[in-house]
Amino acid sequence: FKGFQKFELNNNFIFDADFNFYEKEKTEIVKAKVDGKRSTNFIGRVSFTYNSKPYSLEVGSDGFTMVGDATSGETTYGGGRYMYITLPKTNGKTILDFNKLYNPPCSFSEFTTCLYPPRQNHMPFAILAGEKLEQN
């Protein structure tokens, strides 16, 4: 094992963000490797601004966040990447650091399954931060 390949630390992908809890947890069916679809819950939404445009991501329990972007399938795993964000106790500020993005287990083995980011968590820009696709 030679270690994980990552982009250089990129301060342009660290954001002051706002997190808002949903009044009621939201359940959604998302695509999954191996068995096709799985149910997952989202507890809120994190919002941030990139290049003067507003974006948001739906966030699961404990801050678990699935993200797809313009690098998916190119320099990063095609099924998206994961990260955890630190949740405030109530609606409020948090830090969104895309340098913490990592590949899901299914990027390493055909014998695992994982959830793919929901459509609304696909960013239309390249996130040049976090873990890259393993190159052999």
Image (cartoon, grey):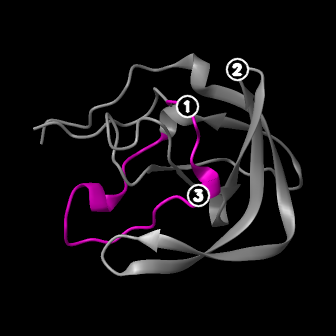
Magenta-drawn stretch contains 67: no
Alpha carbon of mark 2 to alpha carbon of mark 1: how far?
A: 10 Å
Contact check, label 1 and label 3, Cβ < 8 Å: no
The residue carrying pointer 1 sits among few (fewer than 14), some (14 to 19) or many (20 or more) residues within 10 Å by Cα, namely few
Q: Which residue is mark 3?
A: 119
- Please give the name of the residue rendered at 57% of the width and 61% of the height, measured from the top-left corner: 118
Left or right placement of residue 73 versus residue 92 in this view: left
Alpha carbon of mark 3 to alpha carbon of mark 2: how far?
A: 21 Å
Q: Which residue is mark 2?
A: 51
Q: Relative to the observer, which residue lies in front, 102 or 53?
A: 53
The residue carrying pointer 2 sits among few (fewer than 14), some (14 to 19) or many (20 or more) residues within 10 Å by Cα, namely few
| Residue type at the position of mark 3 | Arg
Q: Earlier in the sequence, mark 2 or mark 1?
A: 2
| Residue type at the position of mark 2 | Asn
In the image, residue 125 sits, relative to residue 92, either above or below, namely above
Q: Provide the major secondary structure of the magenta segment.
A: loop
In the image, residue 62 sits, relative to residue 10, either above or below, namely below
Residue 130 found in image quarter: top left
Residue 109 found in image quarter: bottom left
Q: Which residue is mark 1?
A: 125
In the image, residue 47 sits, relative to residue 107, either above or below, namely above
Identify the disc placed on residue 54.
Answer: none
- Expressed as whole percent of the image width and height from the top left, the position of residue 107 reads 27, 55
Residue 50 found in image quarter: top right
Alpha carbon of mark 1 to alpha carbon of mark 3: how far?
A: 14 Å
Contact check, label 2 and label 1, Cβ < 8 Å: yes
Q: Earlier in the sequence, mark 3 or mark 2?
A: 2
Which quadrant of the rendered structure holds the N terminus?
Answer: top left
Residue span colored magenta: 101-126
Q: Earlier in the sequence, mark 1 or mark 3?
A: 3
